[in-house]
Image (cartoon, coloured by chain):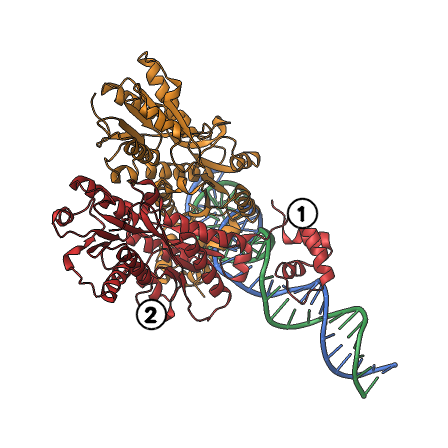
Chain colours: A orange, B red, C blue, D green
Amino acid sequence: MAITIRDVAALAGVSPSTVSRTCKNNPSISEETKERVRAAMATLGYEPNFQASNLASQNSRTIGLILPVSERFIYANSFFLEMIQGINSYCNVHQYTTTLITGQTEEEVLQVIRSMVRTGQTDSFILLYSKQKDPITDYLYSEGLLFAMIGKAYQFANQTIYVDTDNILAGQEATEYLYQLGHRRIGYIGYEKALLFSSDRKYGYQLAHFEHGLPMQEDYSLEINDSMKKMPPELSDLLKRPDRPTAFVVTDDFLGVSLERTCRECGLTVPEDLSIISFNNSLFAQMTSPPLTSIDINSMQLGAEAATQIIHHMENPNLASTKIIVPHKIVMRESCRQI
Amino acid sequence: MAITIRDVAALAGVSPSTVSRTCKNNPSISEETKERVRAAMATLGYEPNFQASNLASQNSRTIGLILPVSERFIYANSFFLEMIQGINSYCNVHQYTTTLITGQTEEEVLQVIRSMVRTGQTDSFILLYSKQKDPITDYLYSEGLLFAMIGKAYQFANQTIYVDTDNILAGQEATEYLYQLGHRRIGYIGYEKALLFSSDRKYGYQLAHFEHGLPMQEDYSLEINDSMKKMPPELSDLLKRPDRPTAFVVTDDFLGVSLERTCRECGLTVPEDLSIISFNNSLFAQMTSPPLTSIDINSMQLGAEAATQIIHHMENPNLASTKIIVPHKIVMRESCRQI
DNA sequence: GTATCTCATGCAATCGTTTGCATTAAATAT
DNA sequence: ATATTTAATGCAAACGATTGCATGAGATAC
């Protein structure tokens, strides 16, 4: 059996309550006794029992990390693991733990969340994605659970804690970058509108056009959905037109790589015939050829901020819901050229 | 406050102990009362408090998942998330939870593990990698902690629960596949020997050569280490030689993509000038061009088996340590050709 | 009809903390 | 010197389960 608070109390010659208060650094314990207790803790190597402590204080120092239910390929974006790294690095220091919530279906995920709440296993969550009309998000809202979202809140923004990239700005900057290189026919490839990071980036792309008085060609912009394994035929058609775009803004590296491949199949070379700028700056961007210019969204920091926020809110209830924007930056590689 | 065992007991007209025993399906409770209790649980929506239950029964139904400390790129392999999916799918059903252990340094990870054990937060682990001379593995062994390893045990194999791919066989089959296509000069690219999956695959590669009486050229095989950002210059040199390999076995898709890129830089095309077969069948393999023939190692199942094993061992102490081999299969794409 | 044995259930202690309240001693006020 | 406040600590009751042991009611044996 591990050593308990009573062992420490006995060694220090105080009562268990004094030990407990010392751990919490309660001001009503004198500095001398605290020192004595700390010494005892140190010699015994005491750490309070997690379960007992949580039971007595009616909380769980555990944050549930909710991953999206989705096709394989969403997962391939390494930023989930990076965000988790960021979250954990903060939690490790502050004595919180994280528990991963995944499932093959939304129903399974909901099931797990419900059970975790009922059993008191977790009392707050970080949603690692944001998506419109998501039953899981709806559930969190409707139950009034405490959670932070990585991504943009699409409803109740004022009552939601969220950490996000300024995707509109990022989309605008990406487009602006191409514009500065002389491109005037610029296309966009993204995901379904429900994925806010993607629609925001597209909105930024449109803003940039508007700002420069550039006409927007509706058919320059494509939407890929979750179930498509590859680029749709419209893209090849578009690339074969004489008035094809000379550059593309693409909502993630994954699509960037896909686009490069499509180009190759259509006999176009990057960046000579087509420039590409994408987002996330994942390994994909570095590895492919030519390596992609990509906007780094700082996944680790996104995670760390989310952890900071949620812990802050757990420890200070009825704090106003904050919104945090993590800066991004463009990482230039070889997929864009001056025209 | 959530509903407790007493509420259920009151409604069913029994004592709390009876409710508890009903949950555990204890045979000494009659079927009729069990039914009555179950009905009460259902109407109240009762689920036992996780912390209280664990405290009383002196366990934690929590498995710590230990991720490798490593350079970004190891993470990019989506199989970590896939393994986690597999682990969770089993845990979800069996009322276990998983907690993620990550850190920027080995010291941080050790710290977290130590603390989790001391505080009784976790009593078993799944190590999501295997590596020689790993301080974390050593710690788990030395403390006699219960853990399962995904990958091959490099010591105490008989006392270790592990789940692995038969990497030797996989390496052999990959090489054999190229041999059958007519290749006779086959190279190998892998990681440092400490990473057993890589050295096993290489061993399989050597076995295949031996079997066919093919000479092994020492300089056909390259070792990439964790910190290299790209392929070493030796590779380009090798590719320019007249007696260069006509095919490569490459230890993961990541390196496969790198190799494709190097080829392009050297003016070689895949598969016309060089065939490539790699491992893991990650998204990389599908996305790159040409898409890579790759050996799928079934990451989800690896995870699920590991979870099964560790839970089985927790519930049946002093069971012998099992070793599980999960089958792999080759997925043919466009990176290999008949010679 | 009493003794013995099952079977099903309840009692109460326990797991290791936390925390409101009581207690004591010392310090200050009168 | 007594009354009152303050500071530091301990007592004991939670928190919500689990589980060894006792108990009581039937069933079986003699």
Q: Position of residue B282 (x, y in %)?
A: 35, 47
User: Residues under labels 2 and 1: Cα distance?
Assistant: 49 Å
| Residue positioned 67% across, 51% down in the render | B41
Q: In this view, does A136 lie above or below B231?
A: above
Badge 1 density bin: few <14, some 14–19, many ≥20, Cα 10 Å: some
Tell me which chain the residue with mark 2 is part of. Answer: B
SS of the residue at dot 1? helix
- Report whether A312 appears left or right of A123: left
Residue B44 is tagged as: 1
Q: Position of residue B260 (x, y in %)?
A: 24, 43
Q: Where is residue A225 in the image (x, y as percent from the top left)?
A: 44, 33
Q: In this view, does B73 lie above or below B33?
A: above
* Residue of label 2: B156
Q: B315 or B174, which lies in front?
A: B174
Residue B262 is tagged as: none
The quarter holding residue A179 reads top left
